Amino acid sequence: MSTTKKWEIKELEKQKSFCKAGKIILKSRIDYLLTSIDNYFKERSVENLHNIRIALRRVRYNMELFISCYERKQFLRFYKKIENLQDLSGLARDLDVFKGNIKSLIEVEKVKINRSLLKKVDERRHNLENNLEIELMKFLHSKTLKDFYKLLD
């Protein structure tokens, strides 16, 4: 039984020009993601993590447009990896934003915050980032990435 994803358009036919455009777009988006990951591992900064998150969103949302051009099982295997990485990067990024908001409250509003809260946020952020780094490394060396990337040539 094949279930349709909420973002699929059933009526969309596999037109050659559409699928050809999809290959070009997805290859470009994945190349940018791989460059962003490489930049992150060269310099682990909040900005480089944010760039990975943006790149993952672009890959995922563009993939949703072109599902009809690919064998469903292989496509969804790769899509789920992208979705998982996007979720992980989002959790770490959310803590960056949260910490920035807390610091702003401390500096601008002179709100007193228990230092243990900031320490817990830092610990949680560190753990999430470690998990993300492991998953990014697995992704870079995965057969799923290699197999999907071959489809784009």
Image: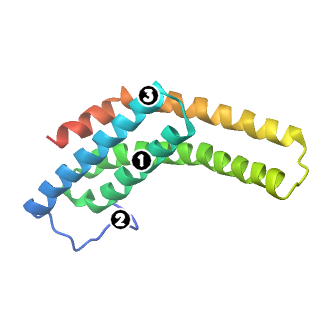
What residue is drawn where x is 65% and y is 45%?
A: 96
Lower sequence index among marks 3 and 1? 1
Q: How many C-alpha atoms fall within 10 Å of the one at disc 2: few (<14), some, or many (≥20)?
A: few
Left/right placement of residue 106 relative to residue 21 reads right
Task: Give the labeled residue for mark 3.
Answer: 138
What residue is drawn where x is 42% and y is 31%?
A: 39
Residue 7, how many percent across, how many down?
Answer: 37, 66
What residue is drawn where x is 14% and y is 62%?
A: 18
Q: How many C-alpha atoms fall within 10 Å of the one at disc 3: few (<14), some, or many (≥20)?
A: few
Check disc 3 and give the amino acid type: Lys
Q: Nearer the viewer, residue 123 or 2?
A: 123
Left/right placement of residue 16 relative to residue 66 reads left
Label 3: element kind: helix
Task: Give the labeled residue for mark 1.
Answer: 56
Task: Give the labeled residue for mark 2.
Answer: 4
Which image quadrant: the N terminus? Answer: bottom left
Check disc 1 and give the amino acid type: Leu
Left/right placement of residue 114 relative to residue 146 reads right
Check disc 2 and give the amino acid type: Thr
